[in-house]
Image (cartoon, grey):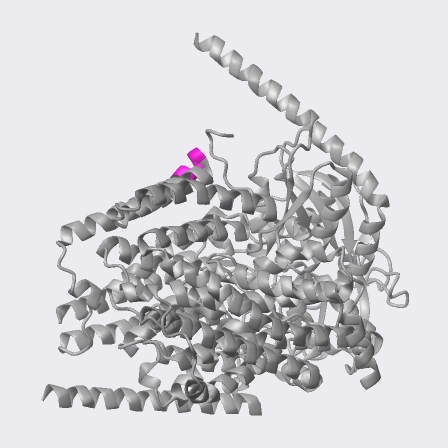
Amino acid sequence: MKKILASVAATAVLVAGAASAQDYPNEAITLVIPYGPGGASDLAGRALAESAGKFLDEPITVVNKPGAGGMNGARFVSQADADGYTLLLARVGMALSPAVNPQVKTGWDEYTFVGSLEATPMILAVKSDSPYDNVEELMAAIKDDPGVMTYAASGATAIDGFTVQSLLSDAGLDPLNGATIVPYKGGGALATALLGGHVDFLAISAGSLMPHIESGDMKPLAVFSPERMDDLPKVPTVGELGYETAGQITGWSALYGPKGLPDSVQAKWDEVLDEVAEDETWLTLAERRGSISTVGEKDMSAYAKSQYELFRGLADEFGYLGN
Amino acid sequence: MLNELMTALHAVATIQNFLIIAAGIWGGVIIGAIPGMTGTMAVTLALPFTFYMDPVPSILLLVALYKGSTYGGSVSAILIKTPGTASAACTALDGYPLAQQGKAGKALNMALYSSVVGDFISNISLIFLAAPLALLALKVGPPEYFMLMVFALTTVAGVSGNSLLMGFVSACLGLLLATAGEDMYGSFRFAFTDDMQAGLSVAPVLIGLFALPELIKLIVFRNPPKARMMEIGDDRVSGREFRSVAKSLFRGSFIGVLLGAIPGIGPSAAAFFSYGSAQRASPRAANFGKGEIEGVAASESANNGACGATMIPLLALGVPGDVITGVMLGAFMIQGLTPGPLLFETNIHEVYMLFIGMLLSSVLLLFAGKFTMRIFTTIAKIPPTLLSPVVLLLCLFGIYAIGNSMFDVVVLLALGVVGFGMFLLDIPTAPFLIAFILGPMIEENLRRALATSRGDPTVLISSPITWIFAALILFVIALTARREIGKANQRKADAK
Amino acid sequence: MTSIALRGLGIALFFGIVLGVLIPGYVPKPAFIPGFALPPDFWPRVIAIAGLLFSLIAAGLGFAGQGTPVLPSEVADDDTPKRVLLFRFGALVAALIAFVLLTDVIGFLGAAMLLTGAAIMLTGERRLLAWGAGLALILPVGLYVFFTEALGTQFPPGLLFN
């Protein structure tokens, strides 16, 4: 009797599983944004929901789950049912945090890598009345008087802290004490700190800085991106300037799901992302955020792995993993 | 300029825009008034709709929701001691006692008039003083910010009820609880479980601490609030009363404007600041916390005064000061507009349209408030034995929905029990909440200031703004000490 | 007056535990914080010491026979036996805990219905039970529909209905 029941149950599960996979999606999909509303990742997630929602028959609901440097929302998704109805707007933080912070328990690979979405360049900027006109002058000034110059970042182990630290390290300076980190929360607060002259420089995501660069209040010195930005054709990338590690650092977004997503879900998303890649709404909104669409371009799991290893190496080199 | 204004007026004065603003204000008031639903929720809810709207109406919709919900928070704060938003916490301190005295209508009206006045002053400041206020706001660096927030924290002394010492203890508990979660440098403090890494959110702490103990009291003591609370009764604000609170009302509005203009402060801190100042200056100081209409006016004028002013750094500098203006910045960018100094050059037409729409929204707030008040006062007719469980239910759903998080719900319930414990031990809860909200701002700015100076504490008194606030802090400490000594002498004299 | 002293000592004990056990155990000082910056445990320590001082002063005042009375008037005026009060409080806390545990089993909606019903019963309402039952059954469904439809909230469905 028990056996029969078990097999009936197993068949039922199989049938239900098959049916739900074939019809995927047959209810609203939740896209978790691991940061608060209004920021660059929030806008990226909402744009994706708008655009991909058109190609799925079901709407995508955006839920903000901020906290713990993005790992709160990331952990939530990695522990969710792998049915394709809970997805994550992953950012570089999902590869960075587990690499550098021993307290973070959700590993870089505890997801299904559905696809890459966009590259979000970071910009190294100073105030427009600052005496430094290029990266070399800035580095020279830091070298003259270590620790006196200050920069704003979301935290020592955040991506916008690593931009500066890798640059310092490439320039032969102490990444932790060469310049003083002053932590602020959120792109708006970071930009304000520089505008108000409370810090000397910063290197944060382009979206938060472009308005101030366009208005002439800030001077861009370099971009953290594989290529120059269309909007700033004259500003060199840090890679071009010969800063090797710094050249590998950039921001990105990707679509992740819980580990073990069914193949049919992945197939559906491959289809949808192909359409998103060409979608007018998606491309316009990406441009306005100051990011470059990379939908479907990268092998996401390999890229995430290389990013994790890059940051792991840096954290080790900088001595962040001690004690 | 006049010509541009007229064309803007023409462009903005359409039935459609009117309906959008009215819907935003009214929707905001209702969402704000429902316990467990917050203004941030209202604004994020509306964000997807703005994708399909023209730039100006979409921003106006968001602004209207923000203002409406900030006022709406006072309705539930007064009627059921459940501040719909954190900025209405001080409103509950006097509004709820007033409601228990059968003066709910009076408190609601006072809250509405104060909100509208604060809102109006805020809009006018935005229109005429945006540039200078934005420049002033940029001057506020970590040391100034730290001093300002410490001064705001002195409000604790005024909301401590009959024991200053217990007020301090309560504030320490609030400050301590606020340190749980992510540290500003990136590590995690007091992360007993994985959920704790994200720290505790304001909404569940606020509602757990204020609203739930009322339910627990009702269940344990079965001593429902007296029947006369059911009547709205004496509901008019007389001209004499209005004049007597006018000073606090206008002071509150200006405090709201000033603090709102500084990115990152927001309506809650402004309301605490204003409440504390009003109490220190008022001849009826002793009546604060026991149902003083001036307290309602001070708190509500400041939180709505801050609403319009948070648009100042957003529009003039392009930097959002809080979550809600952050969402608005997103909406601007989606619409292809870039807030900041350039906006006034390239899109002055849209800016004027926005200003006119905001002025209109002040007026609509008055009507929407009056109308909603009628609806909500009927809830006072529901017997508390049914109402309190319903409030609990609303809070459960609302708090869960904010972050799809069961942890938030657990925090809500746990803080309810903590709040009840504090009631039994006669430890006031208001200082706890104020400290919980201000604590992170104090700590972070202290550590920022000391990082910039590389550990030199004199940075904290290095500019005129910091001198002013340091002096004010000393003044308040002296004043409080004198009052306490006076009270102690009085007790001794009574004992003899 | 001893109750005031006890209250002070109790709170002091709490801050003592925070200072002596929780801060050393649960506030790590990671290697990525530059040496001169204030460490993460600085501020919690300051608060805990301040709280300890305030509560000790309060306890001292209690021993000295000073300070304000501890029991609020609602409690002092209440002549219901302590046993009954404790029972009611215990029942409520049990209901809250049951709610949290039940969301995993019967889902958020069902658990919320039960909790609302339980809370209405616990308030001692017996005349308007029909109303209460109606509220406890219908209102949660309304809220559930509103939040799932308007905000896309996904409430825990529970094991039984998954």
Q: Which residue is drawn at 25% across and 90% down?
A: B486
Quadrant in the rendering for residue B140: bottom right
Q: How many marks?
A: 0
Quadrant of the frame with the N terminus of chain B: bottom right
Q: Which residue is drawn at 71% across and 84% down?
A: B131
Counting from the top left corner in percent of width and height, residue A11 is at 57, 15
Counting from the top left corner in percent of width and height, residue A213 is at 80, 72
Can residue A235 be seen in this snapshot?
Answer: yes
Quadrant of the frame with the C terminus of chain B: bottom left
Counting from the top left corner in percent of width and height, residue B120 is at 60, 80
Q: Which of C3 and B426 is in front in this view?
A: B426
Q: Which of B466 and B315 is in front in this view?
A: B315
Residue lying farthest right? A233
Can residue B272 be seen in this snapshot?
Answer: no
What segment is highlighted magenta in the picture?
A: C102-106
In this rendering, position of residue C154 left or right of residue B436: right
B188 lies above or below C104 = below
Q: Residue at x 47, y 46 (%)?
A: B406
Task: Indicate whether residue A197 is drawn in magenta.
Answer: no
In this rendering, position of residue A227 left or right of residue A112: right
User: Which secondary structure class fits the magenta region best?
Assistant: helix
Q: Residue at x 52, y 86 (%)?
A: B250
